[in-house]
Image (spheres, rainbow, N blue to C red):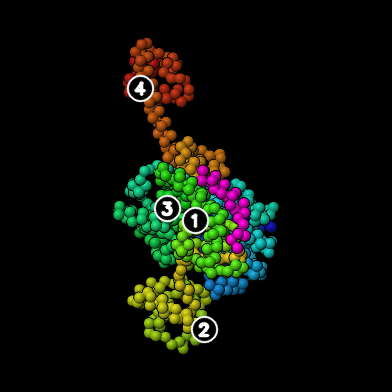
Amino acid sequence: MKNKFSSEQLHAILHRYWGYDTFRYPQEEIIMSVLDGNDTLGLMPTGGGKSLTFQLPAMLLDGLTVVITPLISLMKDQVDNLRARDIPATYLFSGLSSHEQKLAIEKCRYGKTKILYLSPEKLCSGSFLEIMRHLDISLIVVDEAHCISQWGYDFRPSYLKIKKLRDIHPNVPILALTASATPAVADDICLRLGFKENTRRFTLSFARPNISFIVRPTESKDSELTHILSATLGSAIVYVRSRRRTREIAIMLNESGIAADFYHAGLDPQDKNDRQNRWKKDETRVIVATNAFGMGIDKPDVRLVIHYDLPSTLEEYYQEAGRAGRDGKESYAVVLASKFDKSTLSRRLSETYPPKDTLRHVYEMMCNFLDVSVGEGFNHVYEFNLHLFSNRFSINRKVAHNSLQLLTSSGYIDYQDDVSTASRLMVIMDRDELYDLDLSDDADRVFQLILRSYPGLFADYVIISEASIAGRLAMKQESVYEILLLLSRKHVINYIPHRTTPYIYFTTSREEPQHLVFPRNVYEDRKEDLVRRIEAMKTFVFGNSRCRAQSMLSYFGETDTKPCGKCDYCRLVAREKANRTETDSARIRTKVNDFLNQVETSDLETLLKYCTPGDKQSRDNFIQVVRKMADEGAIKIEGLKISR
């Protein structure tokens, strides 16, 4: 059924809320498909503007747009950005307080929000699905849609529950979006989501012609990193794979005179925000980060992305490298490769897939650590300190982390380690009661400043900064924290302090470890698949027989491509060709002189046969050399005759 909205209306909304006058392909086409009621798959590389394809139609449709995403930090950033544009949006994930979850549901129920961001594990609850049944939903969006496919590089079993949402709202169209899917994964996405016959697919080429993909073999990554940053200009991201190393490299760069900062998931939320903003404003040139950095960050003028450590897969690499040059200007994606990186990639396989007995041991110790008895835990959320857990039970931290990920993929828990919530509060006391509130002078000063500084406190939770409040009132931050806790105990406000602790949601009750089953498609099949992906990463980095861009595009199913002419391989080929041409030119010049010393005059064809093997490239080079010699006065050309 054709929708009632015109292209002019779409452009008006685009300009009003986002300030743009034109869409990028295929944004408008995807939006029109969604508004036509079609199930739609959008394969759009990092930086392609995926979020606009559902945020804009959400403003036109009457009901609620539900966006399922596994990235909690991203959903919070997007909700904050939407609210800043006066677009009502909210989010729900298991780490929120019960009061926050209830408030978000009420907003959806009474039409006070247009977009609801949802973590997939919420759909595991029958009672929550019953709530969703009675909401007026007009569009279902599946972000990071590759997570629903067992062939995707980040498969999550909770994504399979999205089909239940389709079952209770069968006539609501689904928009599935991903930045990294092979053709097989794209087909699997459509199958798993139950796409209908009217499915539309829109694929934006994975090619990024403005990015030069460079691999730099090096014995000293620190020296090479410093050299590259010193020899280039513009904002840069350096990706590493450990939190400790982010700090060490940032210190090293600062000592070398390069303004750098570090970023990882374990930082305080306010600290994260401050570092991110300094980098976005170019007060810091380089941000050294784990892969926690970059998702949803709108900085189009990143000129350089450097991988100090190698990702395990080309999907990860493409997403991270693709954060360079979103403005379309010349940019670079550089991999620093050492002779040890091959073995490091291979070692990740055993770290990512520990023995099944190790998985059972980690599960048992995790339940003991959280004090969850056999048969208990279902539908409960527990804060989880991985560092403390690993130390207490003498389990390698990487092994513990990956074991929890596999337990998640097997459907026993949902482990979230990207949760970093800022402090937030809401005034819950009636306005009339506030007049009779008896507070100390310091508490009154804090409360009055909050009322003046944070609008909307009576209707919703707002993010606050204890450090900012303390600074403005010349108080200690600890004093502000204590006062906010006091106001919460008096039921004046509902105060939720910031936290960076990951959490574990039990999707089933605790099992005896010997009863745990790890399906073949979660363990053996995906282990074999990771072997293939790691080999593809090795070929991309250490292979020296093909254009880097062509190699990557071929992996994503684009086979009819030409060499980019810009990567290190293409530049090497061009240099070698130029050297060969220069050598051939010198040889031809010598043979022309030798031949004319013998005969004095020759016709062009005879001289050509003497000087070259006769192929087109040699013939063209011969003509150029002869013309240059004539221009220099070394020989004369009269018609088809050549002489001294």
Label 1 is placed on what type of residue? Val
- Residue shown at the point (54%, 65%) measured from the top left: 367
| Disc 2, SS | loop
Marking on residue 430:
2
- Residue shown at the point (45%, 44%) measured from the top left: 342
Left/right placement of residue 247 relative to residue 20 reads: left
- Mark 4 and mark 2 in contact (Cβ < 8 Å)? no
Question: What residue range appears in magenta?
Answer: 512-535
- Mark 3 and mark 2 in contact (Cβ < 8 Å)? no
User: Quadrant of residue 518 in the image?
Assistant: bottom right
Label 3 is placed on what type of residue? Val
Label 2 is placed on what type of residue? Asp
Residue 434 higher or lower than 608, as above or below: below
Q: Position of residue 455 (x, y in %)?
A: 47, 75
Marking on residue 644:
none
Query: Which comes before the other along the chain, label 1 or label 3?
Result: 3
State the residue position of label 4: 629
State the residue position of label 3: 240
531 or 86: nearer the eye?
Answer: 531
Real-space Cα distance between discs 1 and 3? Answer: 18 Å
